[in-house]
Amino acid sequence: MTFLSQLHVNLSDRYGLKDCQNSYDMHRTLCRLFPTYTPGSFRWRQEPSVTGGLSNKILILSQQEPDWGRLNKNWVSKIDGTTPIDTKIQSICTGFRSDFRIRVNPNRRSVKVGKRVAILGPMEQACWLEQQAQKNGFQIDSLEATPNNKLQFKRVTGDEIVLNSVLFTGTLTVTDQDKFRKVLVNGIGPGKGFGLGLLSVRL
C-alpha cells in the first residue's frame, strides 16, 4: 500500500532542530518510522516555510504505514495524520490536471569529468524538468522555480555531500496515466534519500 503522511518537527528539541538543518540526519531519523525499512521504500520532502525561516513541516510518501511510536516524543510537535492513497492514485487518468510541487536535483552526465554534474542555469533546469515530464507521463503547463538551494552535510563517515536543489511549482496535465501513477510513487531524479524527487499533486 501507499501512505501519505505529514508531521511537524519540534524545533525546540535539539535533535529536531539538527534534523531540520541536515537532510542526511533527517532521513536517518525518518527511517525509524518503518520497522522493516528497505532503501527506497519512502520519499519525503521538507516543505517550504511560509515565513521564510527554517521549515519544520515534513511530507512523507511510504510503502508502509509509519509507526509514530518509534520516534522520540519530544522530536515531534504535531502529527497531521496518515492517509492510504492507492485508490486516489489509481483514479488518476490521462487528461488529469493539477497543481504540483517537487524539489529536485537537476543534473547531467559529463563525459569530460566522468560523473554527473549539477545543472545550474534556470532555463537549463526547466528544460531538464520538461524532459523528465515527457518520460514520466505528464506535460508542464506552467512553471515557477525558487532560487537554488544548496544541501551540504556530512555522513557519519565524515564524507561531505553537496547537492544543488531547486523547488518547482506549477500546473501539469497527465499524458500517460500508467507512467504518471508510477512516478508519483517512485519520484524523479537523484537524491531521494535526502528529501528530493517527491512529486506531489492535488489528490
Image (spheres, helix red, strand yellow):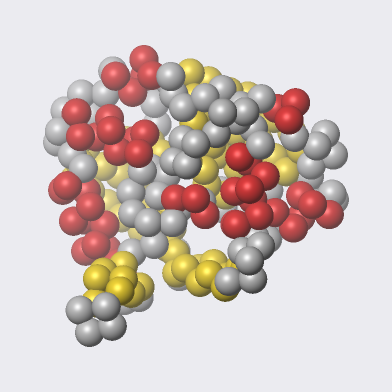
- Looking at the image, residue 72 sits to the left or right of residue 159; the answer is right
Q: Position of residue 36 (x, y in %)?
A: 56, 28
Q: Residue 73: x, y in percent?
A: 82, 34
Asked whether, in this view, residue 67 is left or right of residue 5, the answer is right
Most distant residue in the front direction: 157
Position in image of residue 44 (x %, y %): 52, 43
The vertical placement of 183 against 22, above or below, is: above
Give me the residue at 14% from left, 36% from top.
175
Number of marks in picture: 0
Q: Position of residue 148 (x, y in %)?
A: 45, 70
Q: Can residue 155 be seen in this snapshot?
A: yes
Left or right of 38? Residue 34 is: right
Looking at the image, residue 137 lies above or below residue 89: below
Position of 112 compared to 73: left or right? left
User: Dividing the image into 4 quarters, which one contains the N terminus?
Assistant: top left
**Residue placed at 22% from the left, 84% from the top?**
112
125 lies above or below 51: below
Tell me what residue is drawn at x 49 percent, y 36 percent: 38
| Image quarter in which the C terminus is found | top left
- Nearest the viewer among 72 and 60 is 72
Residue 100 appears in the figure: no
- Work out which residue is located at the far bottom of the displayed protein and give it: 112
In the foreground, 45 or 190: 190
